[in-house]
Image: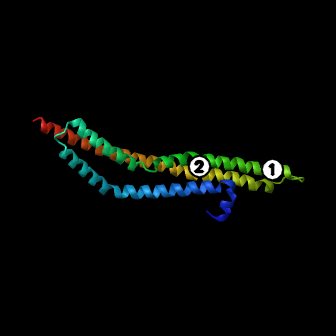
Amino acid sequence: MTMEIIKQLGLMATPLIFCSVAVMAIILERIVYFALDKKRLQNNSDDLKKMLKTHKNHAKPLRDEFVSIALSQMKADYHKGVKLLRVIGTIAPLMGLLGTILGIIKAFQKIASTTTHVSPNLIADGLWEAMLTTAVGLMIAIPALLFAYFFSTIAVQRLQKLSFALNQDSLNIEIEKNR
């Protein structure tokens, strides 16, 4: 953002810039995390399968509980940052709306303080601030919500696939035990 645009955001500049930086940082971190995850997922899958085989003499519910605990930890890792993206995606337009209201108030204050005729130039600055903060709030919210959905979908798909494979392995162990 140029300094002129930042100045025009008025009071909402700092929170909107903070939200924008946070969204970009989370998105970049999650992209890197998921790009590197294929190897990590395979290692975790192999480790969990070994753990199942190590505990093959335990009852199936106990083995499944071990898997459930491990998957819960993986779920937390996969969803890291997604809640914050959703929160920012929700509040950024509200901050933009607040900036809109503040900009309109500024425009009306200028109108009220003038003793001459009202010209469009007099209120244009306040209205520009009003429209700009709304646009910036939406420009932050839309990618935040889209990426939150995208990352959440990837996490759910990968965890479901792993969970299915581990449940199948646990069932196979049980079948082998009962032969």
Determine which of the numbered discs, if any, sits on residue 42 in the image.
none
- What is the secondary structure assignment of the residue under circle 2? helix
Residue 22 in the image, given as x and y percentages of width and height: 53, 55
- Establish if 64 lies above or below 88: above
Q: Amino acid at mark 2?
A: Ala
Residue 41 in the image, given as x and y percentages of width and height: 30, 52
Q: Residue furthest right?
A: 115
Image point (62%, 52%), residue name: 135
Q: Badge 1, how many Cα within 10 Å: few under 14, some, many 20+?
A: few
Residue 48 in the image, given as x and y percentages of width and height: 25, 48
Quadrant (top left, top right, bottom left, bottom right) of the N terminus: bottom right
Q: Earlier in the sequence, mark 1 or mark 2?
A: 2
- Establish if 168 lies above or below 139: above
Q: Badge 2, how many Cα within 10 Å: few under 14, some, many 20+?
A: many
Determine which of the numbered discs, if any, sits on residue 92 in the image.
2
Q: Amino acid at mark 1?
A: Gln
Name the residue tied to disc 1. 109
Q: Residue furthest bottom?
A: 3
Image point (21%, 36%), residue name: 60
Between 134 and 95, the one lying in front of the other is: 95
- What is the secondary structure assignment of the residue under circle 1? helix
The answer to whether residue 177 is left or right of residue 150 is: left
Image point (20%, 38%), residue name: 171
The residues bearing labels 1 and 2 have C-alpha atoms spaced at a distance of: 25 Å
The answer to whether residue 118 is left or right of residue 17 is: right
- Establish if 129 lies above or below 57: below
Colour scheme of the picture: rainbow
Quadrant (top left, top right, bottom left, bottom right) of the C terminus: top left
Residue 89 in the image, given as x and y percentages of width and height: 54, 47
Quadrant of residue 61 in the image? top left
